[in-house]
Image (spheres, helix red, strand yellow):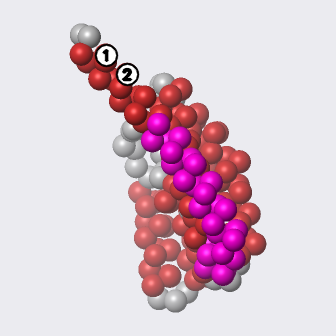
Amino acid sequence: MFGFQEDKETDILHKQATVFSKNGDLDSAILTLYRVKERMLISNVFYTIDQWTRLPKFLQKAGKFNDAIIELNFLIEDVERRHFHYGKGLSKDDIKKSINYDLYGIYHAMSLIYKREKLFQESEEYEKKAQKFYMLFSKQLKVILKKQHEKFINK
């Protein structure tokens, strides 16, 4: 979708954060994920929404709920910049589709974090938002696939 560039140092940092977490050292995992975030923000590599939402999930796990929500809100505010930067050369439909998929992932992560905090009403509200963006993603994907199919058939 966005190419297959790699940033080995960022990949190593992701793995280090996982090791720290498995060893019960959430503080080191979080510090490592802040370094990952800094690198991802300036990188020319496209990162998945799962990679972007690791930091907020770890923050919540460490009892830093407010920091987790701040990070998720940052991801919401930054989603268009990321996709227009990394999606150069893609159609506007492809970019919109990808933005909606990321918004689905962010709101789903937000729902999960609220649920872990036993804030069930808020969790449910964010899951509804997540599903709304997933439906938009699905509709846009169908439109794109239909256009590609028609283009193929009409060759």
Is residue 141 in view from this perspective?
Answer: yes
Point out which mark residue 151 bears. 1
Up-down relation of residue 20 to residue 135 (above or below): below
Looking at the rendering, the stretch of residues picked out in magenta corresponds to: 113-139
Q: Are marks 2 and 1 in contact (CB under 8 Å)?
A: yes
Q: Nearer the viewer, residue 144 or 55?
A: 144
Q: Is residue 152 left or right of residue 88?
A: left
Q: Is residue 15 left or right of residue 130?
A: left
The stretch drawn in magenta includes residue 135:
yes
* Residue 124 image offset from top left, x and y in percent: 63, 66
Is residue 110 in view from this perspective?
Answer: no
Q: Is residue 124 left or right of residue 143?
A: right
Q: Nearer the viewer, residue 137 or 105?
A: 137
Residue shown at 47% from the left, 27% from the top: 90
* Residue 119 image offset from top left, x and y in percent: 69, 77
* Residue 23 image offset from top left, x and y in percent: 47, 88
In the rendered image, the quadrant that contains the C terminus is: top left
Q: Tag 2, which secondary structure?
A: helix
For mark 2, what is the residue?
Answer: 147
